[in-house]
Image (tube, rainbow, N blue to C red):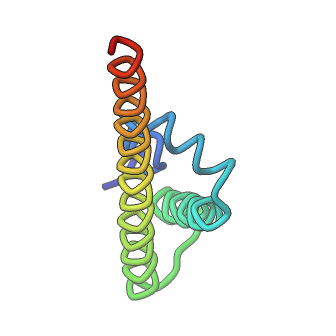
C-alpha cells in the first residue's frame, strides 16, 4: 500500500533487539536485510512516481521483498529459540549447582 513503511523495524518492532543483534553478528542475515531494505526503498520510489517501471517488474519486486521478509522473520525466530534454549540450559545448570550446594 502506498505510503506504508515496510522496513523490518516497522514490520517487527517487537524484535528490534534481535534484528540489531543479527545485523551485527550474522552475515547471512545482514545480506538479506540490506537486500530487503534496498527493495523496500525502490518500491517506495516507484509508488512516489520517481520511477515508472512495468507492472510485471513491480510485482516481481514485491514478491522478492515478501520472500526476503519471510526468510528474515524465520532467522529472527530461530535466533529467539536458540536464546531461549541457552537461557533454559543456564537455569538448569544454576539450579543443579544450588541443589548440590544445599546437599
Please say if 47 is above or below 9: below
Q: Residue furthest top?
A: 102
**The image quarter in which residue 5 lies:** top left
Provide residue 38's location: percent of width, then percent of height: 61, 63
Label tally: 0
Say which of 97 and 82 sits in front. Answer: 97
Please say if 6 is above or below 31: above
Please say if 12 is above or below 62: above
Provide residue 20's location: percent of width, then percent of height: 59, 40
Q: Residue furthest front?
A: 103
- Give the residue drawn at x 42%, y 40%: 10
Q: Quadrant of the C terminus?
A: top left
Q: Quadrant of the N terminus?
A: bottom left
Provide residue 62's location: percent of width, then percent of height: 39, 72
Say which of 6 and 92 sits in front. Answer: 92
Please say if 81 is above or below 94: below
**The image quarter in which residue 89 lies:** top left
- Give the residue drawn at x 37%, y 22%: 100
Say which of 81 and 58 sits in front. Answer: 81
- Give the residue drawn at x 41%, y 32%: 93
Say which of 22 and 52 sits in front. Answer: 22
Q: Is 17 displayed left or right of 24 in the figure? A: left
Amino acid at each position: 500500500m502506498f505510503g506504508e513503511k515496510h522496513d523490518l523495524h516497522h514490520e517487527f518492532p517487537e524484535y528490534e533487539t534481535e534484528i540489531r543483534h543479527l545485523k551485527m553478528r550474522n552475515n547471512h542475515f545482514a545480506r538479506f536485510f540490506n537486500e530487503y531494505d534496498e527493495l523496500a526503498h525502490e518500491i517506495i520510489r516507484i509508488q512516489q512516481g520517481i520511477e515508472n517501471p512495468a507492472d510485471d517488474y513491480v510485482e516481481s519486486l514485491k514478491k522478492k521483498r515478501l520472500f526476503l521478509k519471510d526468510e528474515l522473520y524465520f532467522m529472527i525466530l530461530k535466533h529467539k529459540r536458540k536464546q531461549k534454549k541457552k537461557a533454559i540450559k543456564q537455569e538448569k545448570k544454576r539450579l543443579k549447582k544450588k541443589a548440590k550446594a544445599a546437599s
